[in-house]
Amino acid sequence: MTKSKSNIRRAETLREILEGDIATGFYPAGTRLDEVTLANRFGVSRTPIREALIELSVAGLVEIKPRRGAFVRELGIARLIEMFEVMAELESMCGRLAARRITSQELLDLQTAHESCNMARADGDPDAYFHTNQTFHEAIFRASHNDFLAEQARSLQNRLKVYRRLQLRVRNRVSCSLAEHQQIVDAIKSGDADGAALHLRQHVLIQGERFNDFVASVSKHSQESERTGKRASG
């Protein structure tokens, strides 16, 4: 692996850790993310830290202020729900188009991604499921054959990534998600555009009990992060 690829991989790992720290309240809104402090924490140079902060800025979790540094943005539950509502509509549109336009190879890719999700569930690994789940949704974006729509869906998915990851830690959510995937695959395979759109919208949208579970999950991880932070500083 070349040095540049190693730096990219390191920055991605750091970004994922910082995403989780921000989402769970380890770094509350308004916190300044100092490059030197973070470099010391992770035992790396400032370069991958800087790259990770730039990616977090693009995702909307961090604001980089000239000559002042990077600060955690305020992102409340109400705002998150609004974003999930838009994400649900974007993915619904992708599903509708995919059911009409998907090629044989793209359908095979979708089914393969679904099977990978099933394997991750069987292994009891929510993080592995999260990554295979991204591949599953990406297959639908590509099968829509609408590049602009796919770009918008990817952009918002990236901003919501850490919260979608947390949602998978809710009890039984992975199994439910996999069952929803099967409905989506069946609808797309049969060319049922309305069904694909409906199942994808319901799959992404957080509402009712799922909303309460999601809020409780974020709160739980926030409390755990706070306790960890106190122990580290004590």
Image: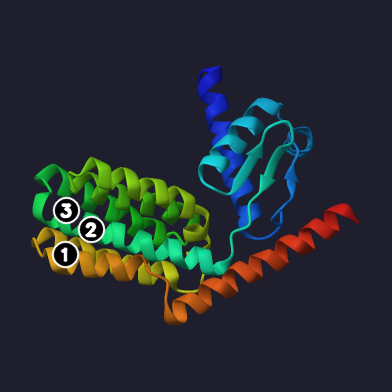
**Where does label 2 land, which residue?**
93
Which residue is at 50% across, 74% downward? Answer: 171
Mark 2: secondary structure: helix
| The quadrant where residue 234 appears | bottom right
Q: In front: mark 3 or mark 1? A: 3
Could you classify mark 1 by the number of other residues whose Cα lies within 10 Å: few (under 14), some (14-19), or many (20 or more)?
some
| The quadrant where residue 129 appears | bottom left
Identity of the amino acid at label 2?
Met
| The quadrant where residue 74 appears | bottom right
Counting from the top left corner in percent of width and height, residue 182 is at: 24, 65
Tell me: residue 191, above or below residue 39. Answer: below
Tell me: residue 125, above or below residue 105. Answer: below
Q: In whole angstroms, how far apart are the C-alphas of marks 2 and 1?
A: 16 Å
Q: Which mark is residue 98?
A: 3
How many discs appear? 3
Could you classify mark 3 by the number of other residues whose Cα lies within 10 Å: few (under 14), some (14-19), or many (20 or more)?
many
Which residue is at 16% across, 64% downward? Answer: 186
Counting from the top left corner in percent of width and height, residue 124 is at: 47, 62
